[in-house]
């Protein structure tokens, strides 16, 4: 918990999109994020998805590592923040070191 990272976004995909019983919408997507040292999956929910687009550089504030089916994933909950970075990462994502 409490990690602050600057990462580049690779591939993204929508995992779940449905309407809850109260009428609100739930949308969950996954994105491969990382830098030259490695990569990891980031789980995004609802409003966070708009910030995470392929090729962009983002800042993850107060993110945490979660275990899902024995694999690590990054997540940003209500206490964290995903925002665009002011300085882009010019390096490619190292997908060979995928956590």
Image (cartoon, rainbow, N blue to C red):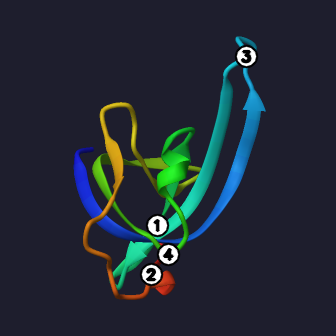
**Percent coordinates x, y for residue 93 in the rendering:** 44, 82
Mark 3 vs 4: CB contact within 8 A: no
Tell me the SS state at disc 4. loop
Tell me the SS state at disc 2. helix
Residue at 34% over, 53% down: 83
* Residue underneath mark 1: 40
> Residue 39 occupies which quadrant of the picture?
bottom left
Tell me the SS state at disc 1. strand
Residue at the far top: name it.
22
Task: Report the front residue among 98 and 22.
Answer: 22
* Residue underneath mark 4: 55
Q: Residues within 10 Å of mark 2 (few under 14, many from 20)?
A: few
* Residue underneath mark 2: 97
Cα distance in 3D space between marks 3 and 1: 32 Å
* Residue underneath mark 3: 23
Residue at 36% over, 88% down: 91
In the rendered view, tell whether residue 56 sits above or below residue 31.
below
């Amino acid at each position: 918990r409490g990690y602050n990272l600057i990462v580049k976004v690779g591939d993204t995909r929508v995992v779940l999109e449905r309407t809850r019983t109260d009428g609100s919408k739930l949308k969950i997507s996954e994105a491969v994020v990382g830098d030259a040292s490695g990569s990891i999956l980031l789980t995004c929910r609802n409003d966070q998805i708009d910030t995470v687009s392929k090729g962009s550089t983002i800042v993850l504030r107060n993110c945490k590592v979660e275990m899902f089916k024995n694999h690590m994933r990054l997540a940003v909950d209500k206490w964290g923040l995903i925002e665009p970075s002011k300085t882009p990462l010019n390096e490619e994502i190292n997908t060979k070191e995928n956590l």
